[in-house]
Amino acid sequence: MALLEVNNLTTNFHTRNGVVRAVNDVSFSVNRGETLGIVGESGSGKSVTCYSLMRLIPQPPGRIESGSAIFDGTDLLSCSERTLRGIRGKRVAMIFQDPMTSLNPYLRIEDQLIEPLLIHEKTNRADAVKRAIRGLEEVGIQDAKNRIRSYPHEFSGGMRQRVMIAMAMITKPDLLIADEPTTALDVTVQAQILELIKKEQKANGTAVIFISHDLGVVAGFCDRVNVMYAGRIVETAGTREVYYHPQHPYNRALQKSRPTGDMKGNELYTIPGLPPDLSRPIEGCAFAPRCEFAADVCRSQPAHLKVIQSGHFSACTRIQNKEITL
Amino acid sequence: MSTSPDFLQITGLKTHFPVESGLVFRKVVGTVKAVDGVNLNLKQGEILGLVGESGCGKSTLGRTILQLIPATEGTVVLGGKTLTDLPANELRAARADFQMIFQDPYASLNPRMTVYSTLAEALQAHSSVKKNELPKLVGELMERVGLSPRYIRKYPHEFSGGQRQRIAIARALAVKPKLIIADEPVSALDVSIQAQIINLLAKLSKEMDLTLVFISHDLSVVKHISDRIAVMYLGRIVELGPASEVFDTPKHPYTKALVSAIPSLDPDMERTRQRIILQGDPPSPLNPPKGCPFHPRCSSAIDACKIDRPEFLTCGNQQVACIRANEIN
């Protein structure tokens, strides 16, 4: 059985300018120990999906309209706050993009690291500190005994992200949600952090939901990938399938527009136009206005995820009807 | 082009920032050597990619070339004019020749000015344009960067990030510059929009014979657009050469690590290849290591690396600041 099963999740933001449909009928599952990537551009709903699971969406203006998220038998979306508090930070942990804003600048690393232990495991302070020091050593912070007394500003960006990882992993969670954990870091440090998450994941058998806008990072890191566009999952499959046999024009276009290996002089492939305004109702497929394969059916009929071949789902109507191949 | 002298000549350029301490009696307690002895020559119409990690001094170098930050030492010569020696009024006039595009198009455009007033101001800054010609000229500029002139009365907040970056590019082009320094122009944009802006910059550079310095931390973006690539580490250029060669056969150990850290779109390759993972963070420019600044993180470092700052060696078509460049390659 899957560790986490999300069914028909829909999250809207009720703003002055209308209802923004940030996440629209999203379903997916994560197995134990597995790494699931969620890729998409800004505004595609990848972060809101995960924030919804943890009920971290500011309400109002946000509202989780429908859906369920069964985590090991408990529905995260309908359980009591009390139950959720027992899960959040203990069995499901999260790392965020910007380690500066997610650490409290007034508190020593020590106090922030042991907080989950004091709350969730009722350990005494001395034991908790010991475990925190071990946690810091595991993420590669030298001289952890002294460094634990430092404040966040005394660490570099990469080091702060290490502290965040140590904090998230200290309770040995079953599921780690990593929201663009390397986007604010340099490529060389990014490689270190990815390696580290992998190591921690292996040691604890943790499942990871890895959110990123960078297709390259996801390629090497994830077992399965969800591609999101305009609040919906448009393609989902094993990583190799997603990269070698894309079954949605958006996924293919996204990969083609990345400058890799291409020599100077060749014009880069571009996706024309802009992502749609989610506060307006979208008829048909949301990607149709930018899609080179769009036909009348795409503009009039809403697109739904359907299986193309075993384990590979696509929300492209024309691919489902076998009218086009990519 | 080969007979003409280089259009932009940078010699021994240094930018140092004093670090002060104390409330009343402020004392200089140290120096951050953000740019520490850079030599570069660019031909007209050439695109140079400048890469490095955050804090390596690439942005400071860009700003020092444009005299937005005064140089501590060294000279910048642009089209025969020595910018570092020009008096303020002549420098101001010379600024028509060189422009900058910034990373964040949300911060670099005035939110209270329409596209028209932003671009008209730039057009009038260095030449006497007749008022009645302005709308036409602004319209032409907008078309040049791929924006429809019907948006002429709109404000920056009404545009997306990519469109704003187009406005910023149009503003830089308004004075008909010969040199543009683009400081991470696509880093704040989504992947699909990045490609549009890179194509636009490449096209403009070709059409207008623009010299372009493209600063980025993303090697794959830089490789696509540049003729040559310069890799910076701790205020110095450590490798310089033709884009494809720096990328495909890097010679400096730091460049090798940078190239190997770029994630590729090929899951099988990602899983099997050996990555060079650097240990630790770049050292503080306040207190750089003696000798080669990269030696504490370098896997090929020997004792000799800790003594002298390495000079450029020629290694194939590349210039490499590593004493072992010919040995290890």
Image: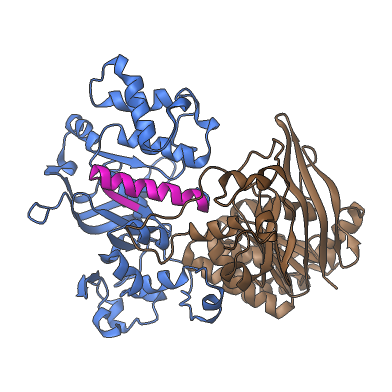
Q: Is residue A25 above or below residue B130?
A: below
**Does residue B45 appear to the left or right of B141 in the view shown?**
left
Q: Which stretch did the figure color magenta?
A: B191-214
Which residue is drawn at the image coordinates 50% and 25% (left, top)? Answer: B154
**Which chain is painted in blue?**
B
Q: In the depicted view, which residue is nearer to us: B322 or B212? A: B212
Main SS, magenta region, reads helix
* The image quarter in which residue A124 lies: bottom right
**Does residue B287 appear to the left or right of B268 in the view shown?**
left
**Which chain is painted in brown?**
A
Q: In the depicted view, which residue is nearer to us: B129 or A159? A: B129
Q: In the depicted view, which residue is nearer to us: B94 or A262? A: A262
Q: Is residue A300 above or below residue A38?
A: above
Which residue is drawn at the image coordinates 36% and 70% (left, top)? Answer: B255
Residue A39: percent from left, percent from top: 63, 59
Which residue is drawn at the image coordinates 18% and 43% (left, top)? Answer: B84
